[in-house]
Amino acid sequence: MDIVKRRIDKIFKAGANVLLTTGGIDDLCFKLFTEVGAMAVRRCKKVDLKRVAKATDAIFVSSLANLERDESFGSSVQGTCEEIVQERISNDELITIKKTGARSAASIILRGANDVMLDEMERSVNDALCV
């Protein structure tokens, strides 16, 4: 547990207050996040994390270790945005990232979609982009 605590401390000393991860986070680690007033989201898909990294000017980090086997985390890999909101929708979580700077990104969630709904959604997005 000391190793995990040290890693979390390195992340927050660099100034991060939101952590998105592909792996699981146990309850004890969640306690460490809440103690420092940070948000942690677990079991995100890599493709989604890479999209968020691109939208926020962050760098997708797979490990804190470098070539010398030292663990470090700096502010150069962190992205920026003004607000992140996490909402529960049925069995899933919706994470809204607002005001990311130079880029804009959006995700659309369709539940129980069939071909007609997908076509209509694509048409609606196309119309919105044309306006």
Image: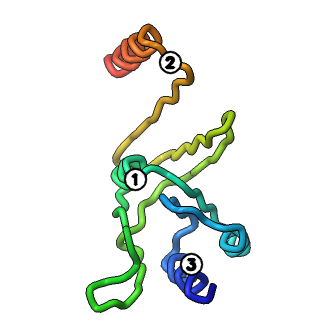
Res. 60 mark: none
Tell me where residue 80 appears, x and y as whole percent.
45, 59
Q: x, y (%) of residue 72? A: 41, 84
Give x and y (percent) for residue 51: 37, 48
On residue 46, the disc is 1
For the residues labelled 3 and 1, the Cα–Cα distance comes to: 20 Å
Could you say where residue 43 lies in the image, as x and y percent from the top left?
Answer: 53, 54
> What is the quadrant of residue 105 in the picture?
top left
The reply to whether callout 1 and callout 2 are in contact (CB within 8 Å) is: no
Q: In this rendering, does residue 54 appear at all? A: yes
Residue 48, above or below 27: above
Closer mark to the observer between disc 3 and disc 1: 1
Quadrant where the N terminus is found in the figure: bottom right
- Is 120 on the left or on the right of 19, as rendered? left
Q: Quadrant of the C terminus?
A: top left
Query: Which of the marked residues, 1 or 2, is nearer the chain's N terminus?
Result: 1
What's the residue at 68%, 41% (across, down)? 88
Residue in view at x 48 percent, y 78 percent: 14
- Inspect the image, locate mark 2, and give the three-letter code of the amino acid beneath it: Ala
> Label 2, on which residue?
113
Badge 2 marks a residue whose secondary structure is: loop
Judge whether residue 101 can be spotted in this image.
no
Q: Residues within 10 Å of mark 3 (few under 14, many from 20)?
A: some
| Residue 8's disc number | 3
- The residue tagged with tag 3: helix, strand or loop? helix
Q: Residues within 10 Å of mark 1 (few under 14, many from 20)?
A: some
Instruction: Give the secondary structure at mark 1.
Output: helix
Q: Is residue 41 above or below residue 107?
A: below
| First along the sequence among labels 3 and 2 | 3
Q: Amino acid at mark 1?
A: Lys
